[in-house]
Amino acid sequence: MTRKNTGFTLVEILIVVIILGILAAIVIPQFTEASNDARKSALVSDLQTVRSQVELYKVQHLEVLPGGDANSWDATTFHDQLTMFTDVSGNTNASKSTTYKYGPYLQKFPTNAFNDSSAVKKVTADPNADGDISGTEGWWFNPSNGRFGANYAAYWQY
């Protein structure tokens, strides 16, 4: 009687494990990059939305930007004026009426996908790659010129 050996040898198993390791080393970084690309796309989309709504607010409110002028700008007022109904002077109300007929410009203020913050930081000069990006706020706004951007060093220019 001959005995038939069935199964895999140690060398065959090692070859399969090595091949699986190589495939994993190739595929896993691509998934990491894909999630980073998705966050970047969400950030760019949110920036375009907020920028267009800030411009619409400005047009409907006699060329005044949300949040007040450069000297009295307030992040809470900025947020409220974009997410609530407003009158021509920028006063806010939770419900629409004949007086509060503008807005809301955003259903909710977006969260920066890179630092999970929806807070807005006032800047006096547009941030640049040299390091004006700081703090935990998700966004920056320059009330002097109406520029709005992401408070995240790698993507400050968007």
Image (tube, rainbow, N blue to C red):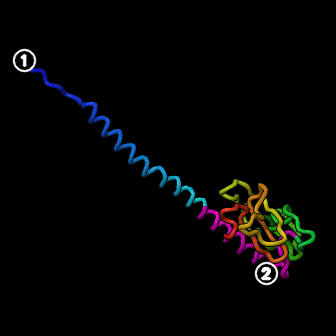
Q: Residues within 10 Å of mark 1 (few under 14, many from 20)?
A: few
Residue 61 part of the magenta segment:
yes
Secondary structure of the residue carrying numbered label 1 = loop
- Relative to 92, residue 22 above or below: above
Q: Which residue is under mark 1?
A: 1
The residue drawn where x is 35% and y is 38% is 17
Q: Is residue 114 left or right of residue 58?
A: left
In front here: 39 or 81?
Answer: 39
Between discs 1 and 2, the one toward the N terminus = 1
Instruction: Tell me which amino acid carries mark 1.
Output: Met
The residue drawn where x is 65% and y is 57% is 113
Instruction: Tell me which amino acid carries mark 2.
Output: Val
Q: Which residue is under mark 2?
A: 59
Within the image, what quadrant is residue 101 found in? Answer: bottom right
Can residue 112 be spotted in the picture? yes
Residue 57 part of the magenta segment:
yes
Secondary structure of the residue carrying numbered label 2 = helix
Q: What's the distance in space between the residues labelled 1 and 2, CA to CA?
A: 95 Å
In front here: 5 or 40?
Answer: 5
- In which quadrant of the rendered image does the N terminus lie? top left
Q: Which residues make up the magenta segment?
A: 40-67
**Residue 153: % across, % down:** 70, 62
In front here: 113 or 103?
Answer: 113
Magenta-colored segment: predominant secondary structure:
helix
Within the image, what quadrant is residue 49 found in? Answer: bottom right
The residue drawn where x is 47% and y is 55% is 30
Within the image, what quadrant is residue 147 found in? Answer: bottom right
State which mark lies toward you, 1 or 2.
1
**Residue 115: % across, % down:** 69, 54
